[in-house]
């Protein structure tokens, strides 16, 4: 897929190589050599939109940001994927996210294509009015390119229900249409119950299947020590579900540092997680809470650090849930040395390729330690977009399902996603005797083949 005269796109190239290498190392291309062509075609976005976003700050100054939407693949349904507002946003990052989204959405079993968008706008330090004016300006352009049957964005890093509301309002004003054009909406105006919880809960449901499968049904989250990174939407609800299922949460973090339990006993409580959630609504840092008497007596705050090498005592499960490339090869080794047997990404591309290589090299139990289960974001965090798909279904049929209904569908989707990855790995990925199946290869192959077949039917490749 290397093409001359293209700008370097490190994150996209990383995501592409990760997928392509798992396909290469399986028997897929031997059985279906024509899929090499499909891989070339699927790796180029159908369309990339880039636009100017001009808005006024509270001092009356003109501010300018870049807006993007990568409409990567529409074989299985309307483009679907979040919007990220973060100063690091660029085309390479949005192409990597959009690329991953294609195969993840395929794994949900729902009819959604893959896309991603956002802006290099930084919501931190902005007033609510500035954020509203930015969202209005951003949607003034984006609304020309999206729609319930075309492209359905949602929130991602830096975009919460509040921003989705501002953008929805502007779409409705300009297009004069009330439609399910965004997901993650408020409950009274078309949002689905469980959408805020879905990604975090879904990761934990997925890991529950890994634990049960690995232990022959004997073990569960009860008594497990779980290291979580991040403290945003995904991290908060993953942590709350771990506690509900009887596990201990031993860390959380944000872009400024890590907060870890100071002793080998105990857990973050649900109340402490709610306190962190409350300061995140105000776009503040964990460091502020960490210095209060209640937190400093129980936790250790390490500025500038990630949790992985700073946990006190054993780790059973690691859930990277902040951002891409947040586990290095060295940190992967440290996690394994601390006892970690299950790694599942709440974040997209949470692990570097070096970290994935370390985890995958430990699928064999006979290397002086227990075998490791590694679940990539494409599979483990698919619950978020899955419930977005359920929100779209509710909107188009003008109904609202109960919490129980949505949660039970989410559980079913995560179970199917786990079983699909497992079965596909057994079918296509040669493994040494006694080695665990590769969930990363299995999930990549399952997602890819579904999209490739649909594209072939549409005449996108031949
Ligand atoms: P939020 O904005 O709610 O939270 C992001 C968290 O990650 C914050 O704690 C933030 O710290 C931290 N963070 C962000 N950027 C960096 C960085 N460069 N370095 C270190 N820490 C960072 O986002 P979400 O929880 O929604 O998303 C987290 C991850 O999960 C992303 O990879 C996202 O793509 C993925 N994801 C999200 C889904 C969803 O439904 N929301 C669905 C599937 C995947 P701070 O508060 O200091 O900024
Ligand atoms: O609901 C969505 O479309 C969405 C939002 C944010 C992230 C993701 C993802 O799957 O990474 C999906």
Image (cartoon, helix red, strand yellow):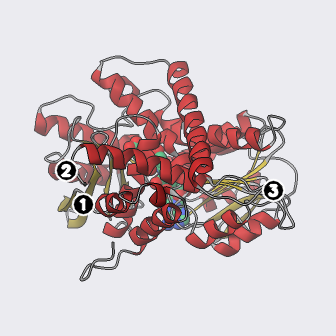
Name which residue lies at 22% across and 44% down: 458
Name which residue lies at 50% across and 30% down: 194
Residue 42 sits in quarter: bottom left
Instruction: Decide if residue 306 is on the left or right side of residue 148.
Output: right
Residue 105 sits in quarter: top left
Percent of width and height locating residue 139: 21, 48
Circle 1 — which element?
A: strand
Residue that badge 3 annotates: 297
CA distance separating discs 2 and 1: 8 Å
* Residue 122 visible: no
Would you place residue 75 above or below residue 138 in this image? above
Name which residue lies at 45% across and 48% down: 447
Instruction: Decide if residue 13 is on the left or right side of residue 348.
Output: left
The answer to whether mark 2 and mark 1 are in CB contact below 8 A is yes
- Outermost residue, front side: 31
- Outermost residue, bottom side: 5
Residue that badge 2 annotates: 142
Percent of width and height locating residue 2: 33, 76
Q: Residues within 10 Å of mark 2 (few under 14, many from 20)?
A: many
Instruction: Decide if residue 453 is on the left or right side of residue 199.
Output: left
Residue that badge 1 annotates: 67
The answer to whether mark 2 and mark 3 are in CB contact below 8 A is no
Closer to viewer: mark 2 or mark 3: 2
Query: Which sits earlier in the primary sequence, circle 2 or circle 3?
Result: 2
Where the N terminus falls, by quadrant?
Answer: bottom left
């Amino acid at each position: 897929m290397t093409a001359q005269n293209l700008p370097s796109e490190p994150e996209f190239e990383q995501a592409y190589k990760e997928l392509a290498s798992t396909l290469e190392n399986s028997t897929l291309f031997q059985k279906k050599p024509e899929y090499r062509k499909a891989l070339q075609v699927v790796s180029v976005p159908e369309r990339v939109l880039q636009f100017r976003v001009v808005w006024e700050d509270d001092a009356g100054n003109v501010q300018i940001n870049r807006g993007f939407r990568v409409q990567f693949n529409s074989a299985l349904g309307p483009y679907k994927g979040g919007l990220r507002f973060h100063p690091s946003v660029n085309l390479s990052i949005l192409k990597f996210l959009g690329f991953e989204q294609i195969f993840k959405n395929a794994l949900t079993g729902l009819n959604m294509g893959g896309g991603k968008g956002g802006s290099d706008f930084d919501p931190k330090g902005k007033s609510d009015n500035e954020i509203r004016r930015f969202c209005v300006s951003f949607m003034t352009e984006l609304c020309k390119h999206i729609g319930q049957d075309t492209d359905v964005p949602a929130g991602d890093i830096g975009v919460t229900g509040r921003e989705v509301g501002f953008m929805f309002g502007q779409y409705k004003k300009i297009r004069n249409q009330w439609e399910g054009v965004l997901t993650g909406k408020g409950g009274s105006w078309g949002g689905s119950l469980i959408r805020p919880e879905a990604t975090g809960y879904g990761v934990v449901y997925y890991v529950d299947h890994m634990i049960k499968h690995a232990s022959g049904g004997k073990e569960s989250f009860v008594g497990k020590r779980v290291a979580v990174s991040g403290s945003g939407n995904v991290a908060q609800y993953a942590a709350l579900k771990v506690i509900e299922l009887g596990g201990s949460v031993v860390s959380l973090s944000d872009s400024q540092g890590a907060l870890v339990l100071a002793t080998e006993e105990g857990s973050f409580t649900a109340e402490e997680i709610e306190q962190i959630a409350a300061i995140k609504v105000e776009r503040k840092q964990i460091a502020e809470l960490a210095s209060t008497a209640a937190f400093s007596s129980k936790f250790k705050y390490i500025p500038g650090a990630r949790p992985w090498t700073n946990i006190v005592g054993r780790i059973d499960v690691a859930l990277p849930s902040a951002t891409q490339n947040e586990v290095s090869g060295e940190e992967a080794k440290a996690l394994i040395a601390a006892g970690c047997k299950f790694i599942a990404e709440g974040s997209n591309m949470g692990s570097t390729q070096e970290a994935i290589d370390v985890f995958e090299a430990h699928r064999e139990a006979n290397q002086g330690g227990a075998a490791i289960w590694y679940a990539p974001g494409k599979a483990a965090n698919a619950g978020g977009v899955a419930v977005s798909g359920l929100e779209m279904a509710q909107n188009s049929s003008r109904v609202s399902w109960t919490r129980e209904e949505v949660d039970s569908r989410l559980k079913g989707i995560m179970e199917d996603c786990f079983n699909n990855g497992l079965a596909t790995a057994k079918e296509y990925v040669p493994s040494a005797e006694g080695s665990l199946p590769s969930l990363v290869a299995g999930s990549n192959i399952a997602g890819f083949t579904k999209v490739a077949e649909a594209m072939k039917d549409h005449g996108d490749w031949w």
